Image: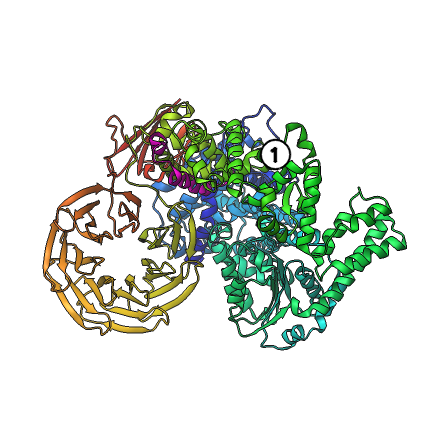
Amino acid sequence: MAPSLFGKVKSKCRKRLQAAPRESSTPSSQTLSPTRPTSQPTPSPPTSTDSDTSSLPSLQERLWNEAYDGLKASEPKLVGTYEKILSAKLHGNDPSSVASEPTDNEIASARGTRCRQMQQLVQEGLDRTQKQASIKRGIDKGLQAVQEVRGIVDKAVHAAPEAAVAWVGVCLGLEILSNPVTEARDNRKGIAYVLSRMEWYWNLASLLLDENKAEQSSKGLRVQLEKHVVQLYEKLLAYQIKSVCLYHRNWAAVIGRDLLKIDDWAGQLSEIKEAEAAVQRDMEQYNTEESKTQFRKLTDTATALEETTKGGLLRDSCRWILDNDEFRRWRDDPQSRLLWIKGDPGKGKTMLLCGIIDELKKEPGNRLSYFFCQATEARLSNATAVLRGLIYLLVVQQPSLILHVREKHDHAGKQLFEDGNAWEALSKVLAAMLDDPILDGAILVVDALDECKTSRDQLLDFIIKPSRIKWIVSSRNWQEIEGKLGRTKQKVRLQLELNQDSISKAVDTYIRYKVEKLTDLKNYDRETSGAVKNHLTSNADGTFLWVALVCQELADTKVVRKRHTLSKLKLFPSGLDPLYERMMEQISDSSDAEICKEILAIASVVYRPTTLEELKVLVESLEEDDYNDLPQIIKACGSFLTLREGVIYFVHQSAKDFLLNKASDQILPSGAVHQHHAIFSRSLAALSQTLQHDICKLNAPGFPIDKVLSPDLEPLSPIRYSCVYWVDHLHDSDSTEVNNILQDNGDVHGFIQKKYLYWLECLGLLRSMSEGVKAVHKLEALKNAEAQQLTKLLRDARRFILSNKRPIEIAPLQAYASALVFSPEHSLIRELYKKEGPDWMALKPRMEADWNACVQTLEGHSHSVTSVVFSADGQRLASGSDDKTVKIWDAATGACVQTLEGHGNWVTSVVFSVDGQRLASGSDDETVKIWDAATGACIQTLEGHSRSVISVTFSAAGQRFASGSYDKTVKIWDAATGACVQTLEGHGHWVRSVVFSADGQRLASGSHDKTVKIWDAATGACMQTLEGHSDWVNSVIFSVDGQRLASGSDDKTVKIWDAATGACVQTLEGHGHSVTSVVFSVDGQRLASGSDDKTVKIWDAAMGTCLQTLNVGRRLNHLSFDPTTNTLLSTEIGLLNLDHPALPPAIDDQSTEIPSRGVRHSGWGISTDGVWIVKDGKEMLWLPPDYRGEKSAVVGSTVAIGYRSGRVLVMKFS
């Protein structure tokens, strides 16, 4: 077996193992992971028909036990012998010893008892192999991973102890490989192959989880996949069992000679590989079907919405386009890549595209994909959704294209397609698909670009990129879209207003169709039918939407008699706006005028469409007795609104535009700010009345958000909207009202004091913690300066949510556990809600008195972070890592906005351009990459250095870019073209740091040759060589005014130089080890330095005195001041607040520490990944990153954790 195989298996499967529940309950328990306590009887083991809802551990248990029982039924003598060997080991005997006596078979038939016996055997086997030699002579090179396999076994058996039957044979196999055996080489190779792939075999069960559960259309594939997985497991167990029996062949009294006639090891291994191949084929087909099903949901939704909200489809109304000169030129000219159809609202753009799609579908060989944007539906109004829809339809037609999706998915997981990285990931997937020769000549269609509200510019940029495919897009006549699409030369523009005759004929066809439908519905006579048709034809003005809305009114059940139809018909004026005006008049004259106008007002200002349940909370004039009538009231709102699946939408974007621009005096007589205030007030009242501890009755503090189902969230149905958006509505209210509200002892003050923690729980349940962080930031920014108590409380509330965002996202009830336990003892939120804390903790860790300097910890990189930097506006933070990626973070919320992939080795340095539009990264792969900071796209890859690039920087103007390298040179690049402008040679060793002066005319470089050089950036001439350091120079920086230069060195000093003369102005001494980073504040008054002495020092740059020393507990290589305040310092460990220095860590001298080791938990303990305090395997208390220690000790219900800093944390649980 090649060594690389094991490595691939390990890396692919580790994520799933780590994501598995940390512990399972004992066999007598009802659950395998945190669930609600229940009085229901213990469920029977799941069968193949109900496995859809199984957890991962229960699936692993069932599949492996089915395989074991199946093998025992088919080869009873073999398994019986194996169980006798195991029985001897249960008593501590060595069956391989000749002196050992035969033992009765004591392995139980009942799964529960057998499970406990197998767990004992696994643990003892792991202990034995730990003590034995790792690998002895004669063993293949690829098997030098015995210790790695031990680790996998240890984790897996903790995750699902009930499935220990799978791992006993593995432990015995490790024992064989760890001893100087002389078995047949084929047998040893087979054992090695099976053991190295056990992690892959083990995780096959995860394909059958709820998260991968097949729709009905692929259920048969799922059953087949499960069958083949069990067959594979059975063959694996048989191979392991036969190998174990052969190894213990000297125990002849037990093992019959007929069982030893095993010499076709290669043939048996081939059978295993054939079984693997069968599973692999099923996996590919099943996962392809699953991917199709998921993508299909989005596209089907888009198509259905178009057909129900935009008047239905009539193909005959669209046929004129086929003979249109512009359309034919686009179709027939290979150079015409883009057809842009544009026109005013209601002109039939959507219908026209539907007709084009239908016609193009008829042509054999056409590969066609399409998407309909809709502004009134959040899922269909963003650029990422467009890409998802287009990708889905392409995969449906050409299944081989799924490989482009799976390549990204296998590399980064499904999260890459769901978070802020989704656009980047999907755009790369689609770009790769469009480059595939199989899609030569494909056609992509996107309707209503103007209704793509999120990331429209990114989508337009993607569309106009040169490619081998053709596009059809439609939009309103908007200048910003014209500005983008107008730049491309290979386009055909088709403006509907310039094709009025064709449009009018198409509308006439549509009218005939709609009148025929009305005639059938209302039983019109010929006269009535003719009158309706004539009126519609005379007044439609070439607008399909107008016809659709009028016909919808005529179809009303209240319009019964012929006379009613004709009289109502005369009330409909020509044109969309006059029609909307008439609809408003009807509403004003109705008995429900007040409530209808209030509903229209709410619909016009809310930030997303609301449900009926949410609307009940927001409508002030709605009585509880009227709740059941709300659908009818919505219907009474003219044809402005439509109700679909309980959600209220505008029938068309033009309806909302009319209400806001031309009818606001009727629905918003006091202005939008008044309506925002009303929604805020109603929302706050509803939240105050509804929110409570554990509102969804999860009952377990570690209940993971991933296991919270939609029915569980039913108690939140009326307040979902209010929970997320109440602060936004306050923000958009009248400023005078805001000042009145944000008073000490006011409504908001009371809400934070009494409901804040419940609100955070609710945000966690709704997966909206990032929105919550933004809301608290907004509240703090809005605060009334006179409200001093509220100001202090909001400041504390902000620190609380920033520090505890992650645990609440993972398990919402950690708002009352981890969040309270690990907050400072004087935290106002902690003190207010101390009664909500965990009553199952008898002794809580002693915490700092107040919040320390670290504002927030950003987690996401899988390896060391090597570089961090703020954008100039302070809104974003970039980080480079040894995991070969760059991440861009939202500095306010801590959310990861982009993950930039492309480097082939460690990322050593990252920097934003001054305008924040670009980001540069240097890497150990000897390249520099320039990225678009908004889209994550790689703009340039700069090659030229012959060794690692370790420092990168932009000039202030952003026109040039410099890089320093281990090749002893500095290179200056043209940032626009990527051309190397200058190569600066002169240093005698590695160049560790490069920086431009603010005016861009000079460049400074620090080197391991102990010097700093100042260069003329235009000519490349060396202007100054600054000598004075006695060791390597690690960091250099200009002051903003360019008059001074600072350098940090391995000689433990910081030197400040006169940049003009090269004279040393100050030598700052005080660090106890190498200085790794220096930076001036924006005003030049302060200088920060980081050191290997694990401190950051803040210096008075003029006097050279040390103002502040922050004991950060580690070396910090990259520092930068927040340019907006100079009170925050960006570092690898987060943002340090310079106004509030960090306090020394608390120490509990009564604690003892011992090395932690992997154990199966019974009672209290620490999860195997060190992230959770667990009880009987259930996650109870999430440990913040700073509280995950190196060593731990557990005695009864007391847990102690020790840290490198010397701090020991002691917690006692009841």
Q: Nearer the viewer, residue 338 or 594?
A: 594
- Where residue 657 appears, x then y in whole percent? 59, 52
Q: Which residue has dot 1 on it?
A: 616
Residue at x-position 78% and y-position 62%? 509
Residue 179 vs residue 41: left or right?
left
Q: Residues within 10 Å of mark 1 (few under 14, many from 20)?
A: many
- Measured along the vertical axis of the image, is residue 1043 above or below residue 207? below
Residue 880 vs residue 247: left or right?
left
Color scheme of the displayed model: rainbow
Q: Nearer the viewer, residue 1132 or 548?
A: 548
- Where residue 725 appears, x then y in whole percent? 50, 40
The majority secondary structure of the magenta stretch comes to helix
Give the position of the C terminus as an image quadrant.
top left
Q: Nearer the viewer, residue 544 or 256?
A: 544
* Disc 1 element: helix
Assess whether residue 781 is covered by the magenta stretch. yes
- Where residue 299 appears, x then y in whole percent? 63, 54
Residue at x-position 60% and y-position 40%? 66
Assess whether residue 627 is covered by the magenta stretch. no
Image quarter of residue 756: top left
* Amino acid type indicated by mark 1: Lys
Residue at x-position 75% and y-position 48%? 553
Residue 84 vs residue 353: left or right?
left
Q: Which residues are magenta?
A: 766-793
The total of numbered circles placed on residues is: 1
- Where residue 908 appears, x then y in whole percent? 31, 58
Residue at x-position 54% and y-position 50%? 262
